[in-house]
Image: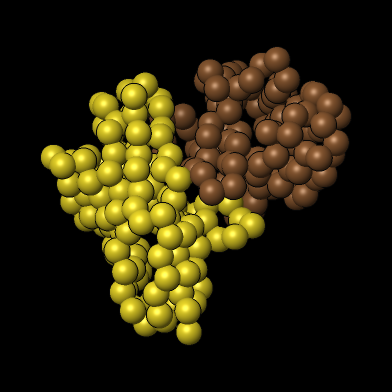
Chain colours: A yellow, B brown
């Protein structure tokens, strides 16, 4: 069964600090790994999309890494801002079957 | 470019009542998705359309949920009759073509069933 596990479930950091969110996936066969940011009361917004052959991808202060051997991905946020407070969702894709598996997200709170 | 539009944004109904949600995808996007997101969980795919045909509805509770995408553009999702466990946010997303995983999400409709 395809699964995406995210950790931690929630995280509180101070403004200006860095943080790293984890995503472990068992999606087979694996094609892509996506990260989304979902603000409260809004729909998810894409941060990064990585194919299985990519190791890292950046989007401003967000950097995602992918290790297809260990089936792990991480999202690193640098110099956090209050506006980074949101839920971050990891998604594993199996393009062969046209199936995607969503994680339950990590809720990040950035405090001043 | 205009994003994915959804309405209503909020809806409160009593159990056993019916409800319908509307979605207008980004212009030119052939693929449309409906997701159910229960509080504290990730989105769960209910149904995927490619133009006006159904690609995947394996997780759609067909005894009470129905969806259509007339003319391959707008889509409606209906629940009849609603149950308490249907309380969730219903997200609509679209992508240019099926298999392209750059999905654009609407703001969602928050449904509360009392």
Q: Position of residue B32 (x, y in %)?
A: 58, 33
Q: Which residue is outermost to the left?
A: A69
Q: Position of residue A23 (x, y in %)?
A: 31, 48
Figure disc tally:
0
Whether residue B1 is situated above or below residue B18 in the rendered picture: below
Q: Is residue A112 left or right of residue A18?
A: right
Q: Is residue A30 visible?
A: yes
Residue beneath the point at 85% across and 36% down: B14
Q: Is residue B22 visible?
A: no
Q: Which residue is outermost to the top?
A: B63
Which of the two residues, B87 or B102, is positioned nearer the viewer here? B87
In the rendered image, the quadrant that contains the C terminus of chain B is top right
Q: Position of residue B107 (x, y in %)?
A: 65, 51
Q: Is residue B5 left or right of residue B56?
A: right
Residue beneath the point at 55% across and 22% down: B59
In the rendered image, the quadrant that contains the N terminus of chain B is bottom right
Residue beneath the point at 84% across and 39% down: B13
Residue A3: quadrant of the picture = top left
Residue beneath the point at 15% across and 42% down: A70
Q: Position of residue A90 (x, y in %)?
A: 38, 47
């Amino acid at each position: 069964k395809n699964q995406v596990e995210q950790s931690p479930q929630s995280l509180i950091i101070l403004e200006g600090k860095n943080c790293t969110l984890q995503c472990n996936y068992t999606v087979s066969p694996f094609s892509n790994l996506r990260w989304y940011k979902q603000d409260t009361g809004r729909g998810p917004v894409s941060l990064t999309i990585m194919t299985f052959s990519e190791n890292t991808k950046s989007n401003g202060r967000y950097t995602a890494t992918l290790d297809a051997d260990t089936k792990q991905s991480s999202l690193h946020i640098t110099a956090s801002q209050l506006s980074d407070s949101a839920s971050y969702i990891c998604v594993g894709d199996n393009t062969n079957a046209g199936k995607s598996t969503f994680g339950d997200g990590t809720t990040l709170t950035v405090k001043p | 470019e205009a994003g994915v539009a959804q309405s209503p944004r909020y809806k409160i109904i009593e159990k056993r009542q019916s409800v319908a949600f509307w979605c207008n995808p980004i212009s030119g996007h052939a693929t449309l998705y409906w997701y159910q997101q229960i509080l504290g969980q990730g989105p769960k795919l209910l149904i995927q359309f490619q133009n006006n045909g159904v690609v995947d509805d394996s997780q759609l509770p067909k005894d009470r949920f129905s969806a259509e995408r007339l003319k391959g553009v707008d889509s409606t999702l209906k629940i009849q009759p609603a149950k308490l466990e249907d309380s969730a946010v219903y997200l609509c997303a679209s992508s240019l073509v099926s298999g392209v995983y750059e999905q654009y999400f609407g703001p969602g409709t928050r449904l509360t069933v009392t």
